[in-house]
Image: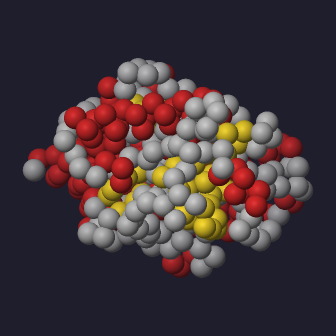
Amino acid sequence: MDAQLQQIVGHFAVEGKVTGIRPLGNGLINDTFLVETGGPDNYVLQRINQSIFRDVDLLQHNIDCVTRHIRRKLEAAGERDIDRKVLRFLPEKTTGKSYWTDGTQWWRVSVFIRDALTYEAVTPEYAGYAGEAFGRFEAMLADLPDQLGEPIPDFHNMELRARQLREAVAADAAGRMADPEVKALVEAMFAREAEMCKAERMFREGVLPKRICHCDTKVNNMLFDRDGNILCVIDLDTVMPSFVFSDFGDFLRTAANTGAEDDPNLDNVDFNMEIFRAFARGYLSTASAFLTPVERENLPFAATLFPYMQAVRFLADYINGDTYYKIKYPEHNLVRTRAQWKLYEAACGRLDEMALFLQKESLN
Ligand code: GN1
Ligand code: MG
């Protein structure tokens, strides 16, 4: 067992003797470990990527407010087994804060939720449960009394993401613009830019609200019980005010993709309408109460926006020389870009079908 990690865990009030610490999950940003103990609970230790989350105080403030609020709601609703339905972060022993830092690295510990399963892909049935869960998550946070900040400013702002791509192209820090494929992808992205930035325009016009959203609704950020019900939504780093498109679109970006996010074989990548229908139906069952007509009408747009935004972000990172996402091989961000672009085009081809489905659902 890594002695340094063990010492870091020692700053938190874990119960029981630590018997093992090993890597957990496959997030692209933070480093995550499972801490095994002889006590009643195991724990999750995370090193927060501070080059991305620059204001850890603000980040943890958001997470503390959100978990506290959800816990209260679950208690008020008379839920049982609450510790499996919302994350619980341990206080650091001397400061009482939900993180510990030595000034160069930032760490936090949460209770590992027992008997929970994670998936990289879901069935339509599970997608339906996920839709309900995200609608409920947004509904529960609608009356959050605290003010949340943006741990990554303008995180899902498409105008910003397009600007960052433009800056990456101009700087060409890794000399990758010489590749004609990269150039063609950049051009294809800019040709769709105006259309894909419509949410920001609607927001400025006052016709689209922001609500507190999760903003990283990948399939693997959800914990399921053995029956496929969602226990809990994890990875709360990006919870912040955003358009509902964020949660709707980003879930489908991973769940409705018939291939992997970084699938090297583009024949595997397509937009699965069965997953769309199941997820949308589940989401509407809990979100209909608060969605405005503009939000609802644009849910199909959201399903195209997120593969587009992710393609823009992966390509910008590739052009910048891979400074943001963890990569496993030199072309990884380009391979990811191709797969997300293919998914974007597939989702665009289904826009009418998605709209029709949602219209029919609203009549039911
Ligand atoms: C990152 O941390 P992780 O792997 O759950 C990223 C998301 C991207 C995702 C792509 C803070 O999420 O926005 O959609 O990778 N998170 C951040 O897989 O940038
Ligand atoms: Mg994650």
The location of residue 56, given as percent across then percent down, is: 65, 34
Task: Check the picture and name the quadrant holding the N terminus.
Answer: bottom right
Q: Nearer the viewer, residue 109 or 6?
A: 6
Q: Nearer the viewer, residue 112 or 152?
A: 112
- As drawn, is 298 to the left or to the right of 215? left
- Residue 117 position (above or below residue 198): below
The location of residue 48, given as percent across then percent down, is: 67, 46
Report the residue at 70% width, 50% height from top: 8
Report the residue at 32% width, 58% height from top: 230
Instruction: Answer whether residue 4 is visible to the viewer in this image.
Output: yes
The location of residue 101, given as percent across then percent down, is: 72, 39
How is the structure coloured here? secondary structure
- As drawn, is 100 to the left or to the right of 37? right
Report the residue at 79% width, 52% height from top: 323
Instruction: Answer whether residue 280 is visible to the viewer in this image.
Output: no
Report the residue at 82% width, 63% height from top: 179
The location of residue 64, given as percent across then percent down, is: 49, 34
Q: Nearer the viewer, residue 321 or 42?
A: 42
